[in-house]
Amino acid sequence: MCDTCGCNVTHANAHLVAPGGKLSKTGGGHEAVSVLRGLLHENDHAAGHNRSHFDRHGVLAVNLMSAPGAGKTLLLESTIAALGGELSMAVIEGDLETENDAQRIRARGVEAIQITTGSACHLDAHMVHDALHHLDLAGLDVVFIENVGNLVCPATFDLGQHRNVVLLSVPEGDDKPAKYPVMFRAADLVLLSKCDLLPVLDDFKPAAARHHLQNLANPAPVFELSAKSGAGMGRWLEWLGREIAAVRQATAARNAVPGDTASAARPTP
Amino acid sequence: MHELSICQALISQLEAIAREQAAQRVALIRLGVGPLSGVEPQLLEQAYPIASAGTLADGAELIIEKLPLRVSCEHCGQTTDALPNRLLCGACGDWHTRLVSGNELQLTSVELIKEETEMIKDARAI
């Protein structure tokens, strides 16, 4: 939604702005000002800046979200182990306290910026902006933003990412998309993590998780994997490769001189 | 409890609008909140007095309009009501729907108090 073309006037709120002009006097003599602007306008503005920054460098930004303990950091460790030689990555870690996750990533030889939010239950675009001041994007392929473990609040705040990846671990139960619709509606990809536990936690039905996601009208793909055993990691890594290529291509197209098809086709350095 | 962060963002917008309009205080705030915005209107109401204390929006009336959840079906073209975790078409049951309304989190309008300056009052008196 934006504040310039009127696309934030929806079917439901149009009647609120119909009477009067931008400025109209009320009965009490107060001056009424029609605003119709997202409450998170400042956050969304900062998120837009972050996204432009990633775009300029042709770097894919992935916002990883899940409940605490669903395996976000282990997924990143396994991804680094699998692709560390081919891809250049960096990680922005969000936690209420400790540098534990950043240290796990650094131990794998990948740069990690830790944001400790104190009591804040989510990352916002301003925090990511500050973290980006400490991160040189030149030469990177992908930046993972590991959000605070929480299935509620992070869903409301745009960080400037290109894609939202939501993990749903087997011990949590297959009805999480029905319980947390705002989060799972925002997912561009859902990873059913800790699938090595499926034989023991056999009440978790991947088909049921897919069904609940479909009820949210979300066509996002759902992959089953275990970052611990490595099973199913291939599809996730392929997805990642395709998304990195798409962002790189879009940046190349933007940088190309209009009408110069040769430079549009040329890969970015 | 991200409602407090959202209230703080609201206060900062209100202060900017009041400055822009040369108003002294905010009297009333109307918000539109949809069920899929991720924000609980009740928690927003509780957080508001804390976030607004000492600002020019302190004591302002907060009216939150809960907006309906409606989806439009890509299959049959109908627009129907839906539930937050069941965004299926109410007419044909298909899941290929588009949200028409229900994820709004917006400041709809504000009412400002502008006190006339002595100079304007003097000019009126003449």
Image (cartoon, coloured by chain):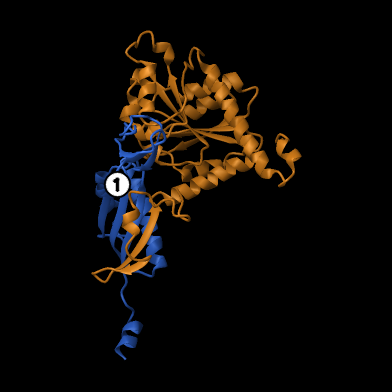
Chain colours: A orange, B blue
Amino acid type for the residue under numbered disc 1: Leu
In the image, residue B58 sits, relative to residue A152, either above or below, namely below
If the image is split into quadrants, where does the C terminus of chain A sit?
top right
Quadrant of the rendered structure where residue B101 is? top left
Q: Is residue B29 visible?
A: yes
Q: Residue A136, image x and y in percent?
A: 62, 39
Q: Residue A44, image x and y in percent?
A: 46, 47
Residue at coordinates 31% horizontally, 56% vertically from top-left? Answer: A16
Residue at coordinates 52% horizontally, 24% vertically from top-left? Answer: A76
Q: Nearer the viewer, residue A227 or A183?
A: A183
Q: Nearer the viewer, residue A205 or A82?
A: A205
Q: Nearer the viewer, residue A4 or A61?
A: A4
- Which residue in the protein does label 1 denote? B67
Query: How many labels sit on residues?
Result: 1
In the image, residue A169 sits, relative to residue A118, either above or below, namely above
Q: Is residue A110 visible?
A: no
Residue at coordinates 27% horizontally, 50% vertically from top-left? Answer: B65
In the image, residue A231 sits, relative to residue A100, either above or below, namely above
Q: Nearer the viewer, residue B75 or A113?
A: B75
Q: Residue A236, image x and y in percent?
A: 53, 22
Other residues around mark 1 within 10 Å, as few (<14) / some (14–19) / many (≥20) = many
Residue at coordinates 65% horizontally, 35% vertically from top-left? Answer: A249
Q: Residue A90, image x and y in percent?
A: 57, 32
Q: Residue furthest top?
A: A199
Q: Secondary structure at mark 1?
A: loop
- Drawn side of residue A166 relative to residue A25, left or right: right
